[in-house]
Amino acid sequence: MPENKISIFIDKTVDFIFMREKLKFHLSHALFSSFDIDTGTRLLLKTIARHINFKPIAKIKDIGAGAGIIGICLKKKFPHIDVTFTDRDMLALDFTELNCELNGIGDCRFSGELGIKSTDAKYDFIVSNIPAKIGGKGLEDLLKKMILPSGPGRICAIVVIKPLEKQTREILAASGARITFEETGKAHLVLHFKPPENTDMINIVTDELAPYIRDDKAHNNFGFSYRLKTAFNLSDFDTVGYQSELLLNLLENEKLGGACLFWNPLQGHVPVLLHKMFPGKITKYILAGRDLLQLEISRDNLMRNGVPGEKISTRHVSLISEVAGPIQNYIIIPDVIPKVKSYDITLKDLCLANIFVSDTSTHIFRLLEGQKTYKIKKKIKKNGFTGVCLVTSD
């Protein structure tokens, strides 16, 4: 197979059989289920093969696709069906696309989404291995939007971990969903269900960020007051973390301006504080990274703190090298990827610009090792982390 931009993340390739179809899947430590097809997905696919009638199904949506295993299995067996894969993690979507190619599958759609959009009436079959850390509000929002609005004859199939069983059943019961099949494994529950006959009583939230919001409160850092919404399962939800603090320590005495790219902006503390520190100097806030939730919560927080929407852009990508210039400043928190074969930030892949990066001291050493383009202008260490300001050598 030709070298792919995400080949460095492939840790294992496994064989799998679904309804007599032989498939292969690339897996990664950077994604869920890195050693094999997880037991929840296996259980869900087994029940789908035995209990879903695919004759009337024309359009499928695989929510939280991960490496694409569920949707790819269905597309391989039923090639006439239109399949859309969604995930909030762009690396997951890139792996899904790569696995489609690996299995000779084309004509699929890939969409970066938080949960499920409220306008998905066109899908006949919606399937999901629901993430364990989705949170209560996220789970309720997802299940309600799976059944409302509903297309004629829609059916849904999900697998959840056992700790989510009680809440899942309560949400479906309150929504009037009709459970058509269920099966319990050692650690998982599979449910197939249809929308209620009358969906008038189901209320859904139109604000796509709302189900992920953990808090909305005032903060005071580096001498500036500001208000931030924070999201579940993202760092810096209560205070500025070590990596963000190191970046801000590096930046506070700089003359920052022009287009700034924020790789992994988390909740938005760093871009919002730089807006306060350098009023009117930053001409473009480029929010970039794998995780769509980080990009959307940071965009929302920038606008709430007075940054005009036209100055903000988002780039939902797997690698920082996919974001083209012009860029005057890179402000980087690298991805945490266990056991990856190569460090995911490579200086040679960036535009010539000022670079501010914060990571573990070991990773910073790997970043700087052997490169000659940049020199260190400033370095700060704290609690096993190092922040460096890099400028071009010429």
Image: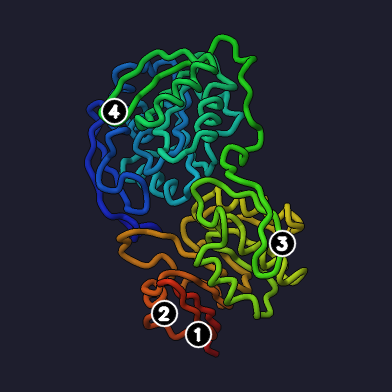
Please say if the residues under marks 2 and 1 sit with CB atoms less than 8 Å apart.
Answer: yes
Please say if the residues under marks 1 and 3 sit with CB atoms less than 8 Å apart.
Answer: no
Residue 196 on image: x %, y %: 53, 12
Q: Quick one: quadrant of the N terminus?
A: bottom left
Task: Of the two numbered discs 4 and 2 on the same chain, state the one appearing first in sequence.
Answer: 4
Q: Nearer the viewer, residue 21 or 202?
A: 202
Neighbour class for label 1 at 10 Å: few (<14), some, many (≥20)? few
Q: Closer to the camera: disc 2 or disc 3?
A: 3
Q: Which residue is mark 3?
A: 225
Give the numbered dot on residue 207.
Answer: none
Q: Nearer the viewer, residue 312 or 137?
A: 137
Q: Which residue is mark 4?
A: 43
Q: Is residue 278 left or right of residue 314?
A: right
Q: Which residue is mark 1?
A: 376
Q: Closer to the camera: disc 1 or disc 3?
A: 3
Residue 248 on image: x %, y %: 59, 71
